[in-house]
Amino acid sequence: MHITRDKKNQPMIEWEQPSGGFKRAWIQDRRGTDKDWAGTGFYLNVVRIEGPGKGPAGNATDFPIYSDIGAEQVLRAFVISVCAITGCKLP
């Protein structure tokens, strides 16, 4: 599982689900902004994308992160869990 960085230097993972369905998950830093609606500062986001390195193909969903687990560990745990639940092979 390969973690990269987006243009805002936020850690992310992109992976393919069967039949060409690509997803991206990333950790967004919202500290000090009016978008920090849960007051946690950090959010796990997930969105469908057109393909590797391509832009979003839908609206992202965000989940506030209440724990102090590191961003890369959160991403790995999320992708592993989603793949296990849906029956997809791990990236």
Image (cartoon, grey):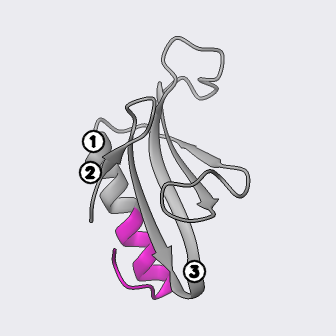
**Residue lying at the far top of the rendered structure:** 32
Q: Residue at x 32, y 48 (%)?
A: 4
* Residue at mark 1: 69
Name the residue nearer the viewer: 25 or 50. Answer: 50
Report the predominant secondary structure element of the magenta stretch.
helix
Tag 3: Cα neighbours inside 10 Å, few (<14), some, or many (≥20)?
Answer: few
Q: In the displayed structure, does residue 66 sit left or right of residue 36? A: left
The residue under label 2 is which amino acid type? Gln
Q: Up-down: is 23 above or below 85?
A: above
Q: Are marks 2 and 1 in contact (CB under 8 Å)?
A: yes
Q: Residue at x 43, y 37 (%)?
A: 66
Tag 1: Cα neighbours inside 10 Å, few (<14), some, or many (≥20)?
Answer: few
Which range is magenta? 79-91
Mark 3 to mark 1: distance in Å?
31 Å
The residue under label 1 is which amino acid type? Ile
Q: In the displayed structure, does residue 52 sit left or right of residue 59? A: left
Dot in front, 2 or 1: 2
Indicate which disc residue 20 carries. 3
Residue 21, image x, y percentages = 59, 76
Q: Residue at x 40, y 61 (%)?
A: 78
Dot in front, 3 or 2: 3
Q: Indicate whether residue 87 is drawn in magenta.
A: yes
Dot in front, 3 or 1: 3
Q: Secondary structure at mark 3?
A: helix
* Residue at mark 2: 73
